[in-house]
Structures are given as structure tokens and as C-alpha cells.
Amino acid sequence: MTTLAAGTRRAYAPPALFAVTTFSSAALVFLVQPMVAKLVLPLLGGSPSVWNTSMAFFQLALLVGYFYAHALQRIASVGRQVVVHCAALLVAAAALPLRVNEWVGAPSSEHPNLWLLAVLALSIGAPFAILSATAPLVQAWYARTVGQAEGKEPYVLYAASNLGSLLALLAYPLVVEPAFSLWGQRYGWSAGYLGFLLLMATLGLLVTRVRAAAPAAPPRAVAPASWSDRLAWIGLAAIPASLMLGVTTHITTDVASAPFLWVLPLALYLLTFIIAFQARPAISPALTLVLQAAAVAACAALLPFRSTFFALQFGVHLIAFFLTALMCHQRLVARRPDPAHLTEFYLCLSIGGVVGGAFNAFVAPVVFTNVWEYPLVLALSCLARPWGRLDKVPPGQWVLLVVGVLAAAATPVAVTFAQGNLSTASVVGAFDQSELFDLGMKTLLILAVICAFLVRRRALFFFLVIGVLSFAAEAAADRTDVRQSWRSFFGVMRQSQTYVSSLGGEVKMLAHGTTLHGAQALNPAYRCNPLVYYTPRTPIGQVFTGLQGARAAMRIGAVGLGTGSVAAYARAGDHLTFFEIDPLVVRVSSDPAHFSYTTECAKGRVDYVIGDARLTLSRQPPATFDLLLIDAFSSDAVPAHLLTVEAVQTYLERLTPDGVLILHLSNRNLDLMGPAQAVARAAGGYALAQNYRPDEDPQGSWESAEDVVIVAKNRAALAAFEADPRWTRANPFLARPWRDDYTNLAGALYANLKTRWTWLP
């Protein structure tokens, strides 16, 4: 090997410059992902699928970038590669400043995936793809300069690249989002892109000089990669990519579809690359295999139990995902090729990312009626573990396999038996029968978890126990009588039934994710009684009955349909319009086979407008509605763009002079009362607030706790409610008002936790 003089090499191409360049490009690439997703999020209702589809697009753009870097290696001259790449960076800069391109028109509720992909391609596709090519391209240049001179592998630069990505992701929710408006973020990123172009040109110039000064090295004979190697690279990359989106959907469905939560799984995903590609990994592959087995077994058992303490669920899922992704990436590194095939290796990694992302974003929502892709891929990841010698399995391992499978399989059988035979009124000792059943069910699940961990050294055995355990836990956790489920781009809906004594029989319920969105009694005597959030005693019911007592007919608007419960208030002279983003919700709630509030109970006209409420309401004439209900915040995915100053100004403009705006803010995980009261004042309205907590369920009703702010253009419109002691004047100083370029969901989450946990400052 010809060695370049140390002084010459370091004068022209400092190794640190390679690391700085890959670090900078990765930081820009992963800083723009949550930024662009936040730009388009308001246009698609805050659905977690926005992030999944965006991630699938970014993985596809990454593949384009890696393919471009691989193809560029066909140019023998590094100098020509530099010229081509800098020219490509300059051409891609035509898409700047960063913005949502409007060429594809308004969002489509029927085909949101296609609309979002088109918008992302036009808005950020070219800069993102070209920036993504930096990591493999710079590593290839490193291999042909520093690597040839000193025999160093270039793969360590991939750790620097992922470190830049990780720090950028952490900086977005902690620094960028709270401190800068979207305008500042867009133009700041655009300036950073132009600065990177200069950095890349500098590195390219120095690399060209090094190659010109160095004697040509004789070519080395390197065997081509086999197809089995390529398929292994793709598979080991696809599993973590799919799991990242699966766990993101799971945790954001329970809190909010917000960038500050989206970045956590992605940050852990990048951290696994950093550890795996280190020369001396902080976590050894052997230790990873032990920890991953324990975490996956615990995760499979806990996954369906949504009522489990959220912090525990949150931690278990993220730990299981992190260790599984780390295991796959460490096994990927163990199979890395000679640097001569470096760009092909990264191209296969990118293909795997696209396969995993496309499965979650495009295939699973069509094939599955629930979020089955997450437990399915989690179980399949077990097959990436070492298989061991299946021809020499000790008898004890067979026993553990059989016991684990039988213990797990017995759980759903026990559930089926218990639902038909156990009575909570029958007490045995200190426990009733249901408590004894729960204890037995948990014992079986724990036994299966232990057996799974003990057979971890054989991937097939481990996979079989985890697969049965996942199914068993799902059956054990599902205690409601789910009659039907549906899935759309906007989430999973389930119709179930339960017995409510105060209503004299069964009640149909509609849940979106883990949030109840309405219910209707089957008893004819109570079928048209609005339930849960909408009974006459709740704040929403108080406003409806109060205004109807003073007005013979009303024009009513309601954002968020659910089961259509508020249609029960529509009198013969009233006209009610529902604004709903998900066409599936309209089909379910307007079908008497499921719910009949809109078809049987409403006496006046009921119609529907499909699309994002910000857009569809803005098209309504000013001074249209006597009453406008914004009921979109109790959902698991909170559309924060419906609670900004600009949004509330739009709502107030659509109210008649004495009209009333209702903001229903009940949410399990976010305290939205503070921001809403601040927004009401900043929007120029007068507001009252009420935190309603029901008494024992009265006969003929079924109520829920409720947080509501009502807003009007003037104080006179709320005079009747201000005289009611249940309503208090709004306090606009509890939080900073949200605007279209500033929201603080992290602050709302903290405020909610603070009210629950008194030790928080």
C-alpha cells in the first residue's frame, strides 16, 4: 500500500473535517424531519399517521440519496464526484426557503397518504435526498484518502453521522421548537443548508488535492457481496425501521401526535446506530441479547394492557424497541462488507428502511383493522437472534418451550371461561372471583415470560413463546365486548358494548384508540339521551339547553362527530353541521346499525362537511353560527392547530354577534385549560371556564368529567352563564397563548402531570 506523507495528508484533508461534514449533514437531515412534519400536521388533523407517512417518505428519500451516492462511485475521479455533488446541492437549493408547497392543492381526506407524499416530495424531497447522500459519499472519500493511507475503516464515520442526527432531534423539542417560531425555523434551516454547501465544497476541494498529491494505489481484489448477505442487510435494517414506527404509533396514540414525542423513538433508533458502529460498543452484543430477551418478553405481556400505568408502559415499550433495534444493528455491523462495497451496504440498509416504513405506513392500515403490525414485527424480530443448534436441544429446553406455550395459550381460554361464568359478587376469602381470576391470569402470563427468557438462546423457541404470549395477552386484556373495529389513515375505531345499570341495559360505545368518543343506550327509553360528555348536566349540555331556552331556532356547528351525540339536541327548527376530517367516522355514526343519534334522535336538519376543520370552517360565511362546538381535543391525537389564536379568531368570525363558542378540552394526558384561556383573550374574546366533575350516575344518564371553556365576542352573550356559579371567569395568565407558529404540548403534558403529582415543582 502506498502511504501518503503525513504532513501532506493532514494539511489537505484533516480526518476531523470528514466527521464534521457528516455530522452537519445528518443534523440538517434530522432537524428538518420533525419541522416539516409539524408544518403539514395541521392540514391532516393531527393524526399519528402523518408522522408514519412522513417517515416512510423520508426513508424513501434516503434510499434515493444512497442510490445516488452509490451511482456516483462509478465516476473514477474524486474531483468529478465533488463537482457533480456540489452542483446537485446547488440545484436542490431551488426548493428553499423551506415551506409547504401548494401546487398539489388542498389536503384530501379520501387519499391523505398520496396528498402528503406529493407535498413532501415537492417541498423537501430534493434537498433531503441530496443531503442524505453525504454519509456514504464522505465515507467513500475517506476510504480512498485517509483509509488508504492509514488502513482505517470508514464505518466509524457513520457513528458521527448518527450522533449529529441524534443531537438535532433532541435539540428540536428542547431548543428549536420552544424558542423559535416556524418562520424562524424555516429560514434558519435554509441558511444552514447553504452553509453546509460551502462546507461540502471545502471538503471536496481538499479531498481532490489529496488524491492529486497521492500516487495511485494498486487495485485490490475484493469478492462481491452475495445475495444472502444483501438480503440479510435488508432484513436486519427493515425490522428496526418498522418497530420505530410501530412504537411511535403506540405511544403517540396514548398522548398526542406531536413532534416532541415522535422524536423519542427516532432518537433511540439513531442511538443504536451510534453504539453498534463504535469500535468498542458501549453495550456488547452478548449483553444486548440478554437484555433484549427480557425486554421483549415483558413488552409482549404488557402491550395490550392500556390501563396499566402509562409511565411503565412508556418505559417498557421504548426499552424493548431500543434493545431490539440495537440487536439488529449489531448483527448488521457484524456482517458489514469490505469498504470497497461500502455504498452498496448502505444502499441495502436504506432499502430495508423503506421496506419497514412502507409496511407500517401503507400496507398495515389496509390489511389490518387494528395496530397489529407492532406486536407482529416485535415477535418476528426474535428470529434475528442466534438460532443455536436445533439438532442438539437439551430436554430441559423442550420442557420450557412446552410449558411457556401452554401457559400463554391457557390465558385466552381462561378469559373465555371467566366471561361466561365468573360473578364479582361471589367472594372467596378476601378476594372475589374476578380478583382470583386476575391473579391466576397474571400468573400464567408471568410463567410464559419466564419460559420465554429461559429459551432465548434458540431464536425459533423464543419466537414461538413470544408469538403465543402476544396473542394471549391481547385476549386477556380485552375485557370489553368489542363488536366491530375499523381502521383508516386517522386511526382505529372500535364499537363495543357494556352494561350500565342506570340506563337499564346495554350501551354501545365508540372508541378511537384508547379514548371513548361517545355512547348510546340500547334501552328505547334512553336511546335518545345524550351520554358521557353531552348530558344536560355537563357544561356542553348546559350551553345547549341554555341557548335553546332563549332561541326558537339555532344554526349549530360541531367540529368532531364521534357518535353524533349532540344531534340529540337538534330541534325541528335547528340546523346542525358536523365538521369531520375522517370519512369513516361519518359512515359509522350515520349508520343506524351502529348509532342513531343523527338519524333517529335529531329532529332538525343534520349535514356533514369532510376535511380539516380549520380549512372547512374558514370557507363558511361570517356570522353563520349561533353555537359552535369544537370537540376535537379529547382524542388521543390532539390537533393543536385547532387551539391557536388564529384558529379561535376564525371561529369567532363565524359566530353571530351573540353566538357562543364551546371549547371541549377534556384530555387524559394534557392540561389544555391554561392555553385555551390565554388563547381566548389573545383572540379578542370574552371567556368563562368550568371543570365539571359528576356525582354518582343518576338514573337515565351516564356522565363523564369535563373541562370546558366558552368564548363569545362580547360579555353580554355570556351573561346568563356568568350568573351561574358553576362558571368562572377565565384566567388568561396560566399559560402562554398558542399560535400557529408556537405550540407547547410538552408544557401541557407537564402541567397535567403537575396536577397529579404534587412533588413536581
Image (tube, rainbow, N blue to C red):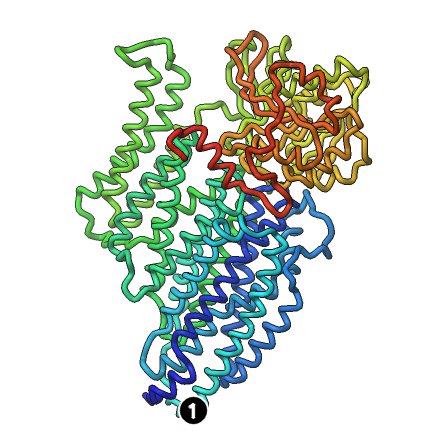
Q: Give the structural element (helix, strand or loop) at label 1.
A: helix
Q: In this view, does 748 lie to the left or right of 537?
A: left
Above-or-below relation of 572 to 555: above
In terms of depth relative to the viewer, which is nearer, 706 or 754? 754
Q: Does any portion of residue 588 appear in the rendered image?
A: no
Q: Name the residue under label 1.
A: 213
Q: Where is residue 437 in the image (x, y as percent from the top left)?
A: 32, 20
Q: In this view, does 594 lie to the left or right of 609?
A: left
Q: Position of residue 9 (x, y in %)?
A: 38, 85
Identify which residue is drawn at 74% across, 37% down.
617
Q: What residue type is labelled 1?
A: Ala
Q: Where is residue 556 in the image (x, y as percent from the top left)?
A: 75, 25
Residue most extreme to the front: 733
Looking at the rendered image, the quarter that the C terminus falls into is top left
Looking at the rendered image, the quarter that the N terminus falls into is bottom left
Q: In this view, does 441 lie to the left or right of 661?
A: left
Identify which residue is drawn at 67% across, 18% down.
722
